[in-house]
Image (tube, grey):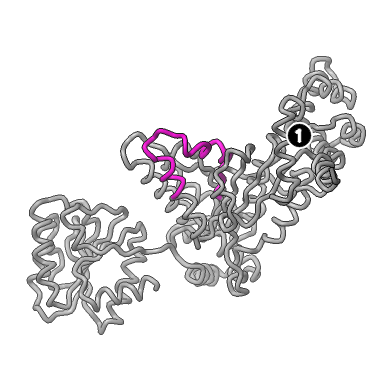
Amino acid sequence: MNFADELSLLIRARYPIVYIATSEEERAEGAIAHCARDQGGRGVYVWDFVDGYQGNLNDAGFGRRNPLQALELIEKLPASAAAIFILRDYHRFLDDTAISRKLRNLARLLKSQPKNIVILSPQLAIPDDLSELVTVLDFALPAPAEIRTEVERLLLATGSSLSAALIDELVQTCQGLSLERIRRVLARAIAAHGSFQASDLDLILEEKRQTIRQTQILDFYPATEQISDIGGLDNLKDWLLRRGSAFSERARQYGLPHPRGLLLIGIQGTGKSLTAKAIAHHWHLPLLRLDVGRLFGGLVGESESRTRQMIQLAEALAPCILWIDEIDKAFAGLDGRSDSGTTSRVFGTFITWMAEKTSPVFVVATANNIQALPPEMLRRGRFDEIFFVGLPSQEERQAIFGVHLGRLRPHNVQSYDLSRLAYETPDFSGAEIEQALIEAMHIGFSQNRDFTTDDVLEAASQIVPLARTAQEQIEALQAWAASGKARLASRGNELSNRLKQQIQQPE
């Protein structure tokens, strides 16, 4: 049931006090006024602390700077007069004893009269003594159809024209913003260029960043990495590219559900975090990074409250990417923790939301230790797919060297022997390859010359890769993936292929 239908039902059922928590005051009042017209032309009275009642000549200014007097108008009108009374920011006065008592008296009276009180507030704050009388009604951010109507209206008003594909992408990117913010960011782009351009989609992501700067739970992470910056991982990249349009309205019309998320399990330094950033950039979606440690507070109930706040914020900014780095460390050893069950409750709330969410929040979680993850996290329905990111093959190492050298030395990348570099660095991860290149640059810089292939090989010879220092753990992780419990992110993972052959061989 949408907002208009639910509000209409509450009005007909004579619910005395309806509380709508929203920062979109103007849009909410428009929706209420539309509902009042559908209810046989009910009168709409709007009050705020500064100007009193507005819009009605007979009562203009009544109740100015007097919230208690504002409630007296409801009694003043004839009992048969059907009306809706909108009280702006009235949550600030609910703790007052006189106002609380007056509202409870009015609630009895309004059961027999066609009148309703609607409290509009940017935040939800209801005292305990009014909780039984107040009905909270959610007012969602604009739906794609409403955003499309507004975008097309603005484009028509400014004489701009966009392709159907760019309008679809614009509507998708604008989801999670209020109509007022959408108007502002489009006006900013049109004022800068005279028309809206595809490059202006980044302005919308910046506008979304403004929404979460004041929270201490989520970080808006700038995502400039591209899919082409990932060396190897071809199976994973193909999977992501096929879902590039899965958040569009066209996908909804086709019948596709919103993608749920992705769990990347593998060895440290193999590009899991880089993949999360590249997904956000390629799909033109904001990247929100969750530090799970920030969910836990010292007060009773604070951790659970922060978890719910995180979920609400992520859904308000949807469609978006929610990146949870090293989730295995956050929820490891749930049964052995002595925190009165706080961690278990937070984990339960989180995985229940992951399984039941209908909002377009794409969760990208990374983990290094599969044994530390609770079994519930691996159950189908939490994520669309679980990928194992192993050590790169020789071909993939060559691609990784090419990506880094193309960024560091784009003018003479041909002077480096990529094939030799890949061959001489077995068991190196992407992070270790990058570190070898940085060390080679130090060698060349200290001798006042550019670094060479030999410098890279010398630097690599000084690095002991993690595959050797943590050989047992990594081989156990590779064996887990090779047994078919996760999809391989690469087409040619050498160690995994060897393990597969060992598993297939009879003892």
Residue farthest along the front direction in this orientation:
507
As drawn, 425 above or below 477: above
Asked if residue 37 lies left or right of residue 129, the reply is: right
As drawn, 492 above or below 267: below
Residue 64, horizontal then vertical, whole percent: 14, 58
Q: Nearer the viewer, residue 161 or 49?
A: 49
As drawn, 36 above or below 432: below
Q: Nearer the viewer, residue 104 or 156?
A: 104
Amino acid type, residue under disc 1 in the picture? Ser
Residue 463 found in image quarter:
top right
Q: How many marks?
A: 1
Q: Which residues are magenta?
A: 322-348
Residue 462, horizontal then vertical, whole percent: 80, 19
Asked if residue 142 lies left or right of residue 437, the reply is: left
Residue 221 found in image quarter:
top right
Label 1: which residue? 429
Q: Looking at the image, can residue 201 be seen?
A: no
Residue 306 found in image quarter:
top left
Residue 110, horizontal then vertical, whole percent: 13, 72
Q: Residue at x 31, y 39 (%)?
A: 300
Q: Residue at x 59, y 55 (%)?
A: 383
Asked if residue 132 lies left or right of residue 35, the reply is: left
